Amino acid sequence: MVYSMNAPQTQSQIEAVARLLAQAGQVVALTGAGISVESGIPAFRGSQGLWEKYDPMEFASIEAFIADPQRVWGMLLELDHLVRSARPNPAHEALARLERAGRLSGVVTQNIDGLHQAAGSRFVVEFHGSGRRLVCLSCGRQVRRGEVLMEVLPPRCPCGGVVKPDVVFFGEPIPEREAMTAFAMASSCQVMLVVGTSAVVAPASHLPVLAKQAGAKVVEINLEPTGLSRHVSDYVFHESASAVLPRLAQAVEDLLGGQD
């Protein structure tokens, strides 16, 4: 395991990881809330996290939503405003650059903000769903966020049922297709980038471990140490994703350019 803490060491590890990415047959990124903080969306955990303000069991469990959807929608609209006004930051854009260079097979994201797609990433597995869609709890109909009026809470489907964001609340299963795709990607990659996630919520937390067990190198980019840092990650950058990923993308592009 190699920690990157200061500028000279960071650059040497950037170059080492760039060589890995340039040579690997398949590279997968697992991203979490930390990658979107610099886009103005608060992380869920930590001193400034969303769960410091809202108890997740009172606002983010499916039981809480069913019991009092009007109350939960109050929190959801606050988050929705932040998500709808957010724009991709250099970290999102760097992952899209790596994909365009043929050095990133896809992104598995725990985020619901759609910023990877907005940055240009084409293969994105939305492990926890998407805030851009709503689903009716009665008839199962899916609608786009802009098609539903929010003047009266909770918003309702034409059938009369209550609608919720098409995201995975605590107590709900991960969509089967997304889960199968993500686990297949993790088990077949040679490098996994773990970016902006504490990797403590199952089943997403299993993905880096699965990749490691299958022989992949795990590259972690998180501001603070996580449970992965000491026992799973091969390279650890305790810096912001927007500071590391653009430099990494540039180093990969330089290597590939030198091979022409």
Image (tube, grey):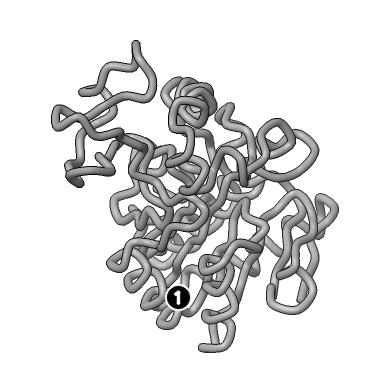
Residue 84 at what x, y percent from top left? Answer: 42, 24
Vertically, is 247 above or below 163? below
* Residue furthest left in the image: 159
Q: Quadrant of residue 187?
A: bottom left
Identify which residue, 236 or 11, lies in the foreground. Answer: 236
Residue 259 at what x, y percent from top left? Answer: 41, 67
Q: Quadrant of residue 25?
A: bottom left
Identify which residue, 195 or 252, lies in the foreground. Answer: 195
* Residue furthest right in the image: 6
Q: Amino acid at mark 1?
A: Ala
Residue highlighted by disc 1: 186
What residue is drawn where x is 76% and y is 43%? 46
Vertically, is 101 above or below 139? below
| Residue 253 as seen in the image, left or right of residue 36 | left
Q: Which quadrant of the figure contains the C terminus?
A: bottom left
Q: Quadrant of residue 10?
A: bottom right
Residue 132 at what x, y percent from top left? Answer: 32, 35
* Residue furthest front in the image: 67
What residue is drawn where x is 56% and y is 70%? 19
* Residue furthest top in the image: 151
Q: How many marks?
A: 1
Q: Is residue 82 visible?
A: yes
Q: Is residue 86 visible?
A: no
Identify which residue, 105 or 167, lies in the foreground. Answer: 167
Vertically, is 51 above or below 185? above
Secondary structure beneath disc 1?
helix
Residue 225 at what x, y percent from top left? Answer: 79, 59
Q: Which quadrant of the figure contains the N terminus?
A: bottom right
